[in-house]
Amino acid sequence: MQMCTPRSNHCHPYRRRKVVRHILPRSLIHSVPDDIREWPVWYESSLKQQQPIILYLHGNKGSRAESHRVELYNKLRKMDYHVITLDYRGYGDSSSVAPSEEGLVADAKAVFRYLRDKSGHSPLFVWGHSLGTGVSCHALSELCQENLCPQGLVLEAPFNNLHDEIRLNPLSQVFHSLPYFDWAFIDPIRDSGNEFKSDSHITHIACPVLILHAQDDIVVPIELGRKLYKAAKDARLPDAMPVTFVELEAEYGFGHLDIPHAPNFLSIIRKFVDKPEAKNLS
């Protein structure tokens, strides 16, 4: 088992070199043993100490170590949450293979199952950002159908499906008038199987869901987040827990990456984690 410093972080390499980083909650940082030989057992046992656990699934750019992600981890750490984050296969220092929806979902499910097995009665949440929302919806759709739902799911800047994301992405607008747009852009995705149909997957997710989206997001337009919210409201099972949509106003300029800078961000997350079934989080 490979170890990483500083003491408040720990790396768990899996068989395919999916390196998983464990960031400790604030209250446990000074409890880490001095002897690094004790770290593997100690870190695993720390998951059972009742602090909430956040499994964070990152977006398409870079790795788990991007600065805006580290900033979020530190906010969650200060809220006394564990943060578990990984690089999917093909990303960061994980296995150097071509990524696919099937592979990314398999990686997320493997880490989730590990956490379920090691966390005892500690509350377990999944947090996806951007592409990570597609990964988390697909993974939890399958896990919830096995009665393995987490306590809650946070979707930050989500899209409803990859087809619509490509159609509405500003970079593709210039090509929309071309008669072969679908053939050149949409059909290859459909043929590859990398569709990330979150609007379908979310209908099988019974746990509470919190959706966060900024009005000025130009990478994943807020229209797609609204479509996903509507799909969840309209098609989830009658006994599913609440889904909440929090819209951040454009005047604040949070865009695609800076929702955690919102003045009420910490209170929204705290309320959701403390009482995920609540319908009013603002």
Image: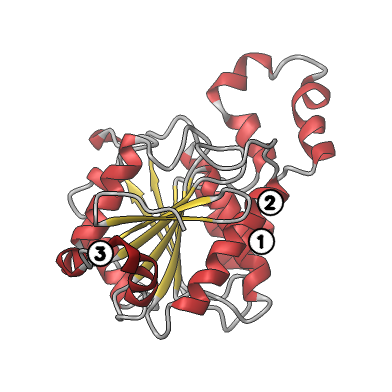
- Mark 2 neighbour class, 10 Å CA radius: few under 14, some 14 to 19, many 20 or more: some
Amino acid type, residue under disc 1 in the picture = His
Q: Quick check: marks 1 and 2 in contact, CB under 8 Å?
A: yes
Residue underneath mark 3 = 35
Q: Quick check: marks 1 and 3 in contact, CB under 8 Å?
A: no
Amino acid type, residue under disc 2 in the picture = Lys
Residue 100 in the image, given as x and y percentages of width and height:
70, 42
Residue underneath mark 2 = 197
Viewer-proximal residue among 128 and 5: 5
Tag nearer the camera, 1 or 3: 3
User: Residue at coordinates 56% horizontally, 28% vertically from top-left?
Assistant: 169
Q: What element carries label 3?
A: loop
Amino acid type, residue under disc 3 in the picture = Asp
Which image quadrant for residue 27?
Answer: bottom left
Mark number, residue 201: 1
Residue 204 in the image, given as x and y percentages of width and height:
65, 70
